[in-house]
Image: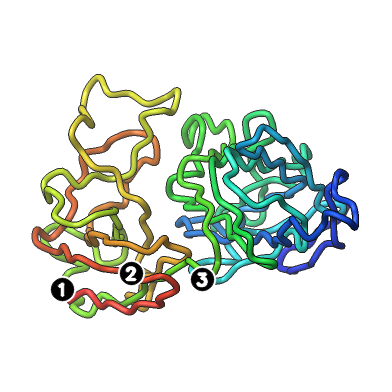
């Protein structure tokens, strides 16, 4: 059994079967990386990447095998860190309707370990062993790179409950594709420690930063994570209508730092909450965001910018 926890290994060059020496100049050479926005209380989220499938807007469908496979613990690559899973593949420039990530169907290679589980592995599954991630664009640049960013607070779901644990599901919800040259990042510190235990908050838990696309948003409409397309989504009791789901969210660490990596350029609304420990990735929980009231800021990220913004 092959185990490569934190190795970044470039695969051998892979060429499209239809690409000959005479027309290879019409293709771009592309690398793909993976990164994650981490989730709490887990020490490992291991995934064995097996193959990438591309569906071009012209209808062409191509496949690129990842040599052997590449097993990655996503928690080893938070924020702006990333792991190379396949390199130097030839792709026709243009709009791609879908990137489908195929996962090796082996329970010994795909699993989650909780921080308090003493190494016990819990199953990590994907519907049909694949993740359909949507569209992206390959330019005419000779060489380019993309990162598949896993926001695990949205994408990783526990099926069942602590008394009836059916393992974890990794969904495409909260997983994005971004060109490395276009990606921006945002990081900072919660400078005012009084924010961590405001009201009934416990300074040791529940401290999160939420990021919403756009500015001038209705602050009262800022919501916790929810996925109305999930089969288990229940809107019968607490309606999510009119609320704005976050683009991403991340925890505040033991040093009161937070960080987002691989963000598209643009305007964002940043909101802090000290009471978001029970944010369910599927259900709309109606959590108080921001908490304390008023801890909202607006941010502009330029292409490629590494922005620092402290919450005070």
Q: Quadrant of residue 170?
A: top right
Q: Which residue is mark 3?
A: 80
- The Cα–Cα distance between marks 1 and 2, rounded to whole angstroms, is 28 Å
Q: Which residue is mark 1?
A: 194
Q: Secondary structure at mark 1?
A: helix
- Number of numbered markers: 3
Who comes first in sequence, dot 1 or dot 3? Answer: 3
The residue drawn where x is 64% and y is 35% is 58
Q: Which residue is mark 2?
A: 301
Q: Quadrant of residue 166?
A: top right
**Residue 74 numbered tag:** none
Who comes first in sequence, dot 1 or dot 2? Answer: 1
Tag nearer the camera, 3 or 2: 2
List x then y, in percent, for residue 195.
17, 69
Q: How are the residues colored?
A: rainbow
- The Cα–Cα distance between marks 3 and 2, rounded to whole angstroms, is 15 Å
Who comes first in sequence, dot 3 or dot 2? Answer: 3
Q: Secondary structure at mark 2?
A: strand
Q: Secondary structure at mark 3?
A: loop
List x then y, in percent, for residue 276.
27, 52
Q: Nearer the viewer, residue 44 or 210?
A: 210
Looking at the figure, which quarter contains the C terminus? bottom left
Residue 215, relative to residue 81: is it above or below? above
């Amino acid at each position: 059994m092959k185990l490569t926890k934190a190795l970044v290994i470039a695969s051998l060059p892979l060429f499209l079967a239809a690409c000959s020496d005479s027309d290879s100049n019409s293709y771009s050479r592309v690398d793909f990386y993976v990164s994650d926005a981490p989730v709490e209380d887990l020490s490992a989220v291991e995934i064995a990447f097996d193959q990438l499938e591309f569906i071009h807007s012209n209808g062409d469908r191509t496949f690129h095998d990842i040599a052997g496979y590449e097993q990655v613990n996503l928690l080893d690559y938070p924020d702006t860190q990333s792991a190379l899973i396949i390199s130097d593949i030839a792709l026709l420039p243009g709009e791609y309707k879908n990137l489908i990530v195929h996962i090796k169907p082996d329970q010994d290679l795909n699993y989650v370990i909780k921080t308090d589980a003493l190494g016990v592995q819990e199953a990590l599954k994907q519907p049909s062993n694949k993740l359909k991630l949507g569209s992206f664009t390959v330019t005419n640049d000779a060489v380019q790179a993309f990162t598949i960013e896993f926001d695990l607070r949205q994408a990783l779901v526990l099926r069942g409950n602590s008394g009836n644990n059916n393992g974890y599901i990794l969904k495409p919800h909260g997983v994005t594709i971004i060109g490395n040259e276009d990606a921006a990042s945002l990081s900072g510190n919660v400078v005012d420690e009084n924010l961590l235990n405001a009201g009934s908050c416990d300074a040791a838990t529940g401290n999160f930063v939420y990021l919403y696309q756009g500015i001038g948003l209705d602050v009262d409409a800022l919501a916790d994570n929810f996925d109305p397309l999930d089969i288990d989504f229940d809107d019968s009791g607490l309606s999510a209508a009119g609320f704005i789901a976050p683009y991403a969210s991340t925890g505040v660490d033991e040093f009161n730092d937070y960080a987002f990596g691989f963000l598209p350029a643009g305007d964002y609304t940043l909101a802090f909450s000290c009471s978001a420990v029970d944010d369910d990735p599927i259900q709309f929980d109606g959590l108080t965001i921001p908490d304390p009231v008023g801890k909202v800021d607006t941010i502009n990220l330029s292409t490629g910018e590494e922005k620092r913004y402290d919450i005070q």
